[in-house]
Amino acid sequence: MLNRYSNSLSCSLTVGQSRQRRRAVAALALAVTWASGLVFLKGYPFLGAASTLGSLVLLWRALPDPMQGAVLSWEGGEWFLRHRGRQTSLVLLPGSVRLPWLVYAAFQETHAKQRWVFLLFTDCARPEELRRLRCRLTLAA
């Protein structure tokens, strides 16, 4: 596959554990609990309790990062993902976000319909790997 700037250096990023991700999920859980408490105080106790329990269960399931241990790489104009002993070729979907504290990128397998979403905080990879990924995403846009 020919991409713009396909002759530039390759990049590889290994996703690690992120404390910032855990803090963000905890802050979201606190906000959802507070909002459900307001619903409870407005006179809807069953709705408030049910939404609190449901939201906390979903946020608890969101706490572990499903992409931890995955290796995202760009080599010779193509994206690759190595995850759980399987390597697949990917296509970058539009809409990636590159902020100094967060990188969001969505990919789709080239020969399948499965989508892969990366939400990378600054502490889940080495700074050099994240810098190269931001550069690569900027060039791909």
Image: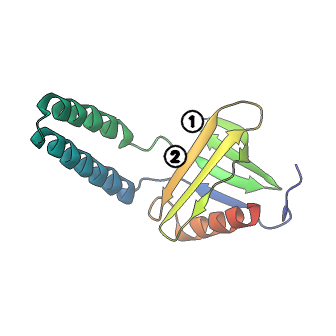
Q: Residue at 55% of width from left, 49% of height from top? A: 118
Residue 14 on image: x %, y %: 56, 54
Q: Amino acid at mark 1?
A: Arg
Residue 39 on image: x %, y %: 18, 41
Q: Decide which of 83, 52 is in the foreground and name it.
A: 52
In the picture, the disc for residue 69 is 2
Q: Residue at 51% of width from left, 61% of height from top? A: 125
Say whether residue 72 is left or right of residue 47.
right
The kind of secondary structure element at disc 2 is loop
Q: Are marks 2 and 1 in contact (CB under 8 Å)?
A: yes
Say if 4 sits above or below 44 in the image. Answer: below
The residues bearing labels 2 and 1 have C-alpha atoms spaced at a distance of 8 Å
Looking at the image, which residue sits at the far front? Answer: 43
Q: Quadrant of the C terminus?
A: bottom right
Q: Amino acid at mark 2?
A: Gly
Looking at the image, which residue sits at the far right? Answer: 2
Say whether residue 131 is left or right of residue 109.
left
- What colouring method underlies this structural image? rainbow
Q: Residue at 25% of width from left, 51% of height from top? A: 31
Q: Decide which of 52, 81 is in the foreground and name it.
A: 52
The kind of secondary structure element at disc 1 is loop
> What residue is shown with label 1?
84
Q: In terms of sequence position, does the residue under pointer 2 or pointer 1 come before the other? A: 2
Residue 30 on image: x %, y %: 23, 50
Say if 127 sits above or below 56 in the image. Answer: below
Say if 45 sits above or below 117 in the image. Answer: above
Q: Decide which of 106, 14 is in the foreground and name it.
A: 106
Residue 72 on image: x %, y %: 64, 51
